Amino acid sequence: MKLPTPPVAAPLVLVVEDEPGIATILVAYLERDGMRTLFARDGEQAVQLFRQNQPDLVLLDIHLPGMDGVDVLRFIRDQGQTPVIMVTALADDVDKLVALRLGADDYVVKPFNPAEVVARVRAVLRRSQPKAAAAPMAPIRVGALEINPAEHSARVYDPQGQATPLPLTLTEFRLLALLASQPRRCFSRAQLIEHCLPESDALERVIDSHLSKLRRKLQLAGQEEMIETVRSIGYRLWPGD
């Protein structure tokens, strides 16, 4: 007798927001869309709930009492690659860029339409999930760099054949995989946004922030000049000798 397939749990979203009215609206819209929610009113509570529950996504306000959203984001990135959407005020362009440099997957700006926030959450969750129907892709090797789309991993090999894993965020991995898919091809910032952040309204300079952090990680792994900036055009991956 065939046993019934156990139901798939709805995504769990941790909402971190110090304004109760906004938090109530976000929770209501997320739950109406079929998601489970947790609520934290400050950074310390957010860290505690994250440790205890391991949510599928964190919706995180930048400005929080005590431990602010950027510090919470740093903690989450130290733990792994859980998707994070930052919530910021309209004038906080600097906050947006800092958050994206630290590995946020997207951001929304206050005041916002709650239905749009839910759509952003769904979009980031989709990007973070491997596509079950897709055929497994072979690893991509460019010089000393190897990217394994099936494992969602990347590593750099030294001359002795020892591998150094690259701790990449979801967006960084997507950018690196795209650049590595066509080495030496120059991709414009608009093309990188279209392929790697298709559901985002991110500005072109946001790509500069992601690639700056990606370049630093490659440098730490011994690949100093692998990502090249093509003046006034965009970026390309250069395999070297």
Image: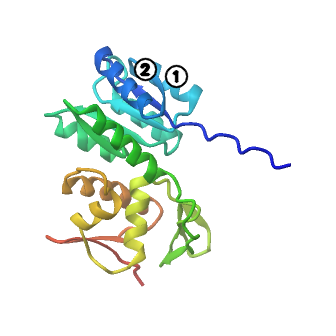
Q: Is residue 213 left or right of residue 53?
A: left
Disc 2: which residue: 40
Q: Is residue 11 left or right of residue 87?
A: right
**Disc 1: CA contacts within 10 A as few (<14), some (14-19) or many (>=20):** few
Q: Secondary structure at mark 1?
A: helix
Q: Is residue 130 left or right of residue 204?
A: right
Say which amino acid is labelled 1: Gln
Q: Are dots 1 and 2 in contact, CB under 8 Å?
A: yes
Disc 1: which residue: 48
Residue occupying image coordinates x 23% and y 36%: 95
Residue occupying image coordinates x 32% and y 54%: 210
Say which amino acid is labelled 2: Ala
Q: Report how far apart the C-alphas of labels 1 and 2 lie in the structure.
A: 9 Å
Residue 143 percent across, percent down from the top left: 47, 78
Residue 161 percent across, percent down from the top left: 62, 73
Q: Is residue 217 visible?
A: no
| Vertical arrangement, residue 3 with respect to residue 70, above or below | below
Residues 193 and 117: in front is 117
